[in-house]
Image: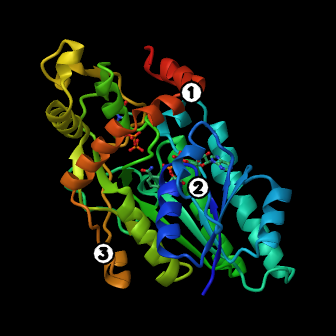
Amino acid sequence: MTKQILVTGGCGFIGSNFIRYILEKYSAYKIINLDELTYAGNLANLKGVDHLPNYQFIKGDIGDKELVERLFKEYKIDVVVHFAAESHVDRSILGPEAFIKTNILGTFNLLEMARKLWLENLLENPPLFLHISTDEVYGTLGIGDPPFTEKDAYAPNSPYAATKAASDYLVRAYHQTYGLPTIITNCSNNYGPYQFPEKLIPLVIYRAYKGKTIPVYGEGCNIRDWLYVKDHCCALDLVLHRGRPGENYNIGAENEWRNIDIVYLICDLLDKKYPSKVHGIESFRELITFVKDRPGHDFRYAMDATKIKTELGWKPEYTFEKGIEETIDWYLNHMDWVENIISGDYQKFFERYYGMTL
Ligand code: NAD
Ligand code: TYD
């Protein structure tokens, strides 16, 4: 069976890993990758697969009505996998408007176009709309609280989380009201190759490698549940093929770490792989600097992934030890990729947010 899949945000971190995964596994599927190439999107993330006949890149905004309508019609889209978003909490604190525009209005435009074309009989079937969301919509947990389940109420705390929650609600409403077959996945923190180095794990690797200070917010005690990106892609593959429309699936690895412990782990692994002495220090841990905390910083996220495990048979394949080691090696071998994407825009953000130079 062939599928015509519109992937949005396929030049970002998870989207590019997902496209690689699908192209490798399903040669009969066609991927149309719609990406605006914001600071976070990078064509180099698809190097090596971008020449394939069943892959097509389209540069554009998910909020562009005419473009989205044309793509649905021209490629007879039967599945949308929607990654495109503004995704960094700290940026949402400095400037929420872009998050409203892409995460809420952009998602609305995709949903509305799918509904309209289906109702006008311009598409054979209603497209399946797989919406990629986050654990952050559920708010924050205390130590000892049970992990979030799909039944928990949303309580977003950052502008990023609020816009993702709003988009989740729209996706749900398009299923309940119009019968569009939609599925929402809410995943915990991802790590792995091609993640923009504004996020904790690649930021630590890059700054340590360069011998620069490693900023840890507050006392570094906040907790995140980390999942290797390839395990996320595998979960999305299962949801795409066997998930039930109208449902939400939580995805997480039961792999909770305090930020400071992750930072120590990366420093210690780097000490074994790359001599810190080139920077005149004995260990990369010496670079750790505690900085002012993120406003509204969620203390802990943890996901209960029982539903996707029991219903779809998913489980993560990567241990954290294996995933983090592969990730560090990937970054050490792709420092040119990192240097290339740290554009003027990222430098400006970094200086504004952290009050120090990149
Ligand atoms: P990312 O920031 O790395 O990539 C986002 C991509 O979307 C970029 O390629 C960017 O160019 C593109 N984009 C942004 N605005 C656009 C627009 N208006 N039109 C078209 N393209 C646009 O993000 P990511 O980390 O890969 O996250 C992907 C999705 O997964 C997001 O929806 C995010 O909320 C969700 N998610 C991420 C994580 C995580 O840990 N990274 C965890 C759970 C859920
Ligand atoms: P991040 O990777 O931005 O993901 P999220 O906020 O979506 O969970 O941050 C992960 C954790 O690391 C979060 O608790 C904030 C913290 N953090 C730092 O301590 N220092 C940093 O420079 C960054 C970017 C994050």
Q: Are marks 1 and 3 in contact (CB under 8 Å)?
A: no
CA–CA distance in space, label 2 to label 1: 19 Å
Q: Is label 1 in a helix, a strand or a loop?
A: loop
Placement of the C terminus among the 4 image quadrants: top left
Q: Residue 40: name its quadrant.
A: top right
**Residue at position x 35%, y 64% in the image:** 231
Q: Which residue is mark 1?
A: 343
N-term mark: 3 or 2:
2
Ligand 1: does it lie within 8 Å of the C-beta at label 3? no
N-term mark: 1 or 3:
3
Q: Position of residue 314 (x, y in %)?
A: 33, 76
Residue 246 vs 271, above or below: the answer is: below
Residue 59 vs 269, above or below: the answer is: below
Q: Which residue is mark 3?
A: 306
Left or right of 262, for residue 293:
right
**Residue at position x 28%, y 62% in the image:** 253
Foreground mark, 1 or 3, reads 1
Q: Residues within 10 Å of mark 3 (few under 14, many from 20)?
A: some
Q: Position of residue 54 (x, y in %)?
A: 64, 69
Residue 159 vs 76, above or below: the answer is: above
